[in-house]
Amino acid sequence: MKGQHKRTQFHPGHDSYIYWCPDCNLPLINTKCALCHSTGERIELGPPGDVRLGSPYERSVLHNVLTNNYGTDPLGERIILLNKIGGEDKTDQVIVDGLVLGILRFDLKYLDWRLDLSMDGAAVMAQHTRSRIVELSDVKGHLSGKTVKSDMIQWCSDDVTKGDDVIIRNGKMTGVGTALLDAVDMGQGDVPAVRVRKIGKGRARLKDAVPGMDDVVRANAPAIKQLGLNAMNTIKGLANQQEYRGQPVYVSFSGGKDSLVVLDLTRSALKHSPKAYFINTGLEFPETVEYARTFCSDNNIDLHELDAGNAFWEHLPDFGPPAKDYRWCCKVCKLSPAGGITEEGKYLTMDGKRRYESFSRARIPPKEENLLVPGQVNVYPIRDWRAIEVWLYIYWRGLDYNPLYDEGFERVGCWLCPAALGAEYRRMLELHPDLFHRWDTCLREWADQRGLPAGYIDHGFWRWREHPPKMQLLARQLGIDVVPRDAGAEAFQISVVSGVSPCKAGGYSIEGSARGVRPPDAIDMMKMLGEVRYSEDLGVLVVRTREGSVKLYADGTFQVNGGDRGTTERLFEVAARQLMRAVKCTGCRICEKACPKNAISFEDGHIRVDDGCDRCGKCDAVCVVTRYMGAILDG
């Protein structure tokens, strides 16, 4: 896509594997089991490896899929791990008794749950069911990836219908495939009957031992304790540094599991209780608001609730529904309330962000200054933890957690967030039909105004402005047109919304509106001004220069801060020039030739700027596009 960089491979802090105790039959976050002292067997995980314990709701989903497809659920009360992997929506590897049984996913095409069994999963289920079984007449040769004809079918269960996932038996081999015929047509004629995905010698078995959660916690207790000590040492070490000594310590408490752990770790690490702040975006689940208030009240924690009020609904008519690549809501519902914390000098805020959560968080540092909240230094004491370690700590410490996790939510942010999974959004209909229908009505009215079909909303296409390949493919499969009537490229324009005015953070500021350009589009050009940082989470591009700062938000807001009026005006003009170059570039490559550091190159027809840029300005001086600067600013 235009202006976008190629995404680098996800490299979190841990390798993608976990251990499993063969004797106690439970997962281990370290190599040794604290119960029997056995060495765990290594289980490879699909990246990024943010494995977690299955919630009660997720267990019920798996139970229903197994019983609906195969007439039985042999897993019972066994420990179930779910490992999130790439997919069009909620997609997890299912791990039981140290075996990867398959992939449980929410299918956006059918808006329902599917289970794709692995060979181990097929071998296990074949021992407990006679449903969805196709037995071959001992066919010889390599079968994986092949199609088997009907005259090679020896027996088929009556419940098989065309398109079903089926368990395939061929002598001592077991595998998985897709039925190409109904059961009544199997074994008749010389026509394709079953497509074999994979087949092999299936020896997988469920183990006799069925441990409980208490056993899992005790088996991992030494490792959990060490993780906690390491995190507390990080917190204490920073809080005792001269720069922060005597300053208050905050914890960003969202009501989620990660911030809960950080809050407990911070309370344990410090001699005094930290302050907690909760940003109520006005779109929080009712359960989350009640939980955050109750937890802090019950534990004598000073909670500062920063309320965005009705800001989202007030801005919705102007900006339309937010999207994964258009998160204007974060500015008005999160960043604006966060400014309500007023402290002199620098202060620490303990935050629960983790590397495993997303690509944008994969490389978060141990701590960083918040470029959007003056004075705030964010610390990430559990940045290398996986979800299973977070949950084991919660169980080990006996902490009360947000009840929404038991109801099928991986995250407990805003209830209409476009970053939420489609499976979770459908769950909203069951838990909070009033909230669901309010938002659903807004979405359908918005789509109707743009000539978009009802399926655009039903299948979750509204969650993107520029649809990724997986969603483009889904749209073609469903025959849904995802191009609105007004989909023409927005004309580039920068307008000054407010004149130069004193800034509460010091100095002066100018606010404007930048249309026709998104933050990711401007990353390279803005490197010519100063240090660039882009937050995919918030959709915010921040540039630090010697003269001040420039911020470009996904909603089009464009803000420049400088030390005095003249400096601010000059920085605004220079920044506007770079934005114009990002959008209007003709590909003449004059700037590439003019750069004395060879820091400019072209990739897919777009300018790329590397770290060799010393911001000399020679490329800007020769750019033919910047000659038209006067026609762009509206004043």
Image: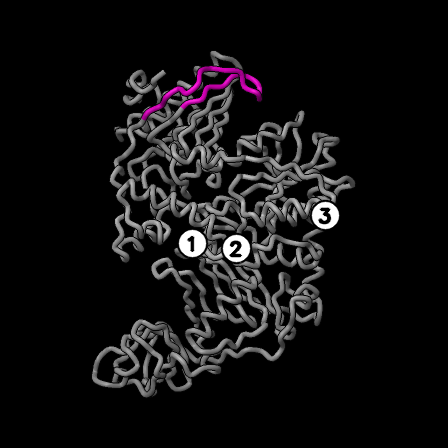
Q: Can residue 237 be seen in this view?
A: no
Q: Residue 298 carries which label?
A: 3
Q: What stretch is highlighted in magenta?
A: 493-512
| Contact check, label 2 and label 1, Cβ < 8 Å | no
Q: Measured along the vertical axis of the image, is residue 510 above or below residue 318?
A: above
Identified by mark 1, the residue type is Gly
Q: Residues within 10 Å of mark 1 (few under 14, many from 20)?
A: many
Q: Residue 409 carries which label?
A: 2
Identified by mark 3, the residue type is Asp
- List the single residue furthest toward the top: 566
Identified by mark 2, the residue type is Phe
Q: Measured along the vertical axis of the image, is residue 125 above or below residue 579?
A: below
**Mark 1, residue position:** 422
Q: Is residue 174 visible?
A: yes
Mark 2 or 3, closer to the camera: 3
- In which quadrant will I find the C terminus? top left
Tell me which colouring the rendered structure shows. one colour
Q: Distance between the residues labelled 2 and 1?
A: 11 Å
Q: How far apart are marks 1 and 3 (CA)?
A: 34 Å
In the image: residue 91, left or right of residue 304: left
Could you say where residue 128 lies in the image, as x and y percent from the top left?
48, 82
Could you say where residue 74 lies in the image, as x and y percent from the top left?
52, 77
Mark 1 or 3, closer to the camera: 3
